[in-house]
Image (spheres, rainbow, N blue to C red):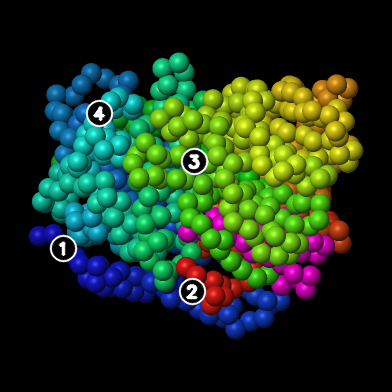
Amino acid sequence: MPVTLTRRHFAALLTVLTAGATGVLSVATGQQTSAEATQEKNAAGVLPASVTSGSVVQVVAHPDDDLFFMNPDLSRSLLSGTQVTTAFLTSGESDGRNEARGGAARDPEQPADRTHYAEARQNGIRAAYAQMATGDRTSAWRRTVMPTAGGGRAEVDVLMARPQVHLVWLMLREARSIGGDNPASLRGLWNGRIPALDAQLTSGTPVKEPFSYTKDQLIQAIAGVLEQYRPTTIRMQDPTPGRYGENGRFTDHQDHMYGARFAQAAAATYADRVHRRPHFTVQSYLGYHNGTLPHSLDPQTAETKTGFLRTYAWQDRQDHCGSPSGCGDRKVAGNPTGRNWAQSLRYTRADSASWLTEGTPGRLWAFAALDGRMAYWTRGTDGAWTGPALLPGTGIDPGATTARLPDGRVAVLATRTLFGAVAAEYRREVVYAVQSAPDGPFGPWQSLGTPEKNDDEGTSAISSPAAAVDPQGRLTVYLRDSRRTLRATVQQPDGDFSPWQRLGGEDLQSDPVTAVDAAGRRHVYATTTTSVLAWTQPTPDAPLLGPSPTGLPATTVPLTAAPDGAGVRLYFRRPDSGVVRTALVTAGPAARPRASSVTEAGGRAGYGAVGAAGRLVAGRADSGTISTTTLGGPPAWAESRMLFAGAPAAVLEPTGTITTAVLGLDAELHTSTSPATPTRPTWHRAGRLTQAADADR
């Protein structure tokens, strides 16, 4: 008989299952590990080197969304021993036929049966996770029942050999269509077209009684999962993927999009309701649109990822699970790479390297969204970091960018999600906050609105902002809109901002980047599917001209820009490789950009944006860890032992030292300081959470 667990009993189950697993229980319950206790007693100068810590909760719509769109981040987290919990919102029952697409004729022995097909997908997920975590796809699981905060029941699976690995199955009905108008779906529930969404139980689940959720109940159920596991990193799909084409089709599955909105709302509820908890950060992932972009993973990493998908797809047809429903998702077996999805991983927020900046001489400021609020850390002239402190105001999305004003004040910019009283009021807008004085407190958030008129038109698919400052200290903010063109708003002498201007371009991907060259000319760059476009000034006081082609090759999308003498140096990755490349772009006659030949850092591949300062480049290695290399040096990366969220950032200081920063999976800032010709930086956690900051949560 299934065991029904109260929260108290579930906590007791965690205690039993994690007994003997070093460090797992302490992470799960928010207690200190021995390493953390030692760190508190040590002085900042002798802190132990940073290693992966924290806990991860992933929220996805369907079984396999995690394998297609969150891997290799997922497998790297599992291999590191991090506590990982994945919550699946729907059962993914589709049409109930477990057969390989593009394969032989329909198997008469496999009639349409949604309960059995959903169970087969569960079996495939369990096998894939077991393989990623232990190397043995047949490693045993314990399946139990947990009551949810929404009034329903969820199945919880615990990997017995690695009890820090949990799967939570909420088992709601899926939309059964990528974009079709089906009210009985997450989309219909979010938009109020149905009062409640029914469960779709699987054939083998220990959950036996049917249930349904209203919109608020589902939000509460997901928030309850977050409260149970207390994550420091929350992974979700893209809540604002946008539309394309004249018919305005979504660029992603509707369940992915609206499931992510439920996860967003649940994270906000959790942050507001539970005050004594770890800080958390959010990482969102690109979905179907990956298939239209150059591959971001190197062949070996992509093949390993595809291997886990083959396990999930039950490609060998061997009965290794003993289930009459089947041991995997045969729909994926015919094409385990999906529609060009397995060869890439991309983030849709927090993929910019401009969140670390110098303020007044010797003082650094770092920003990241924690708990849906903007957090900042600051390093004084004595070299000691303090923070995080949280700015007032909620709804702040992952991904911060900074601008330094001429007097040393710092401005921070981000996007903010507004849920509204009804679904039609959901939207994103650009906000900024500026220090009232150099090294002083930040003023309130000010809204710059959005070029999108309403969410129904463009699904709020705006990028993170990029910002430039003129000699008078006025901001210009750049943004990619939902039509994938560049927009800008300019601060006027009275402090107000202009309406959003159209700067053109098409097929823009990711976030725009901006920098000013030694002559004072502003550059703005944005990637397309095939190259990079530029907007530049012929003279410092001239209008920005563009878009102009740079002639640069295709990239894996994210760009990093840094001033470099007479031009701006761009950093990006080579498709199907992940090797870091760089080129110097200068503003030629009539502001037509001229790009140098492309050079490569060499060494091992990786993925995601890079941070760069001086000759140092920091980025995510193919192992997923933060790693560094030196341009012009040996073609090798110095790898750390730490996984992280978002992108690294780096600053070259007037003293010639380089400070690099990342946000770990523990939602803490980690930094390294190196000379101008670094060899092997060591990462340390920056500062400690103060009592004032803790009380502010």
Q: SS for tag 3?
A: strand
Magenta stretch, residue numbers: 357-384
Q: Pick the residue in front: 525 or 424.
A: 424
Q: Residue furthest bottom?
A: 41
| Upstream in sequence: badge 4 or badge 1 | 1
Residue under circle 4? 182
Q: SS for tag 2?
A: helix
Q: Pick the residue in front: 72 or 416.
A: 416
Q: SS for tag 4?
A: loop
| Mark 4 surroundings: few (<14), some (14-19) or many (≥20) residues within 10 A | some
Which of the two discs, 2 and 1, sits closer to the camera?
2
| In this view, 502 is above or below 85 | above
| Upstream in sequence: badge 4 or badge 2 | 4
Residue under circle 3? 428
Q: Pick the residue in front: 422 or 207.
A: 422
Which percent across, then down, holds residue 272? 40, 61
| Upstream in sequence: badge 2 or badge 3 | 3
Q: Quadrant of residue 418?
A: top left
Residue type (three-letter) at the residue carrying disc 3 = Arg
Q: SS for tag 1?
A: loop
Q: Which mark is residue 66?
A: none
Which of the two discs, 4 and 2, sits closer to the camera?
2
Instruction: Give me the C-alpha separation between circle 4 and circle 3.
Output: 25 Å
Q: Which residue is pictured at 55% across the width and 39% down the height?
A: 449
- Residue 199 inside the magenta-drawn segment: no
Q: Is residue 679 visible?
A: no
Instruction: Give me the C-alpha separation between circle 2 and circle 3.
Output: 29 Å
Residue under circle 2? 695
Instruction: Give me the C-alpha separation between circle 2 and circle 1.
Output: 35 Å
Q: Which mark is residue 4?
A: 1
Q: Which residue is pictured at 74% across the width and 28% down the height?
A: 535
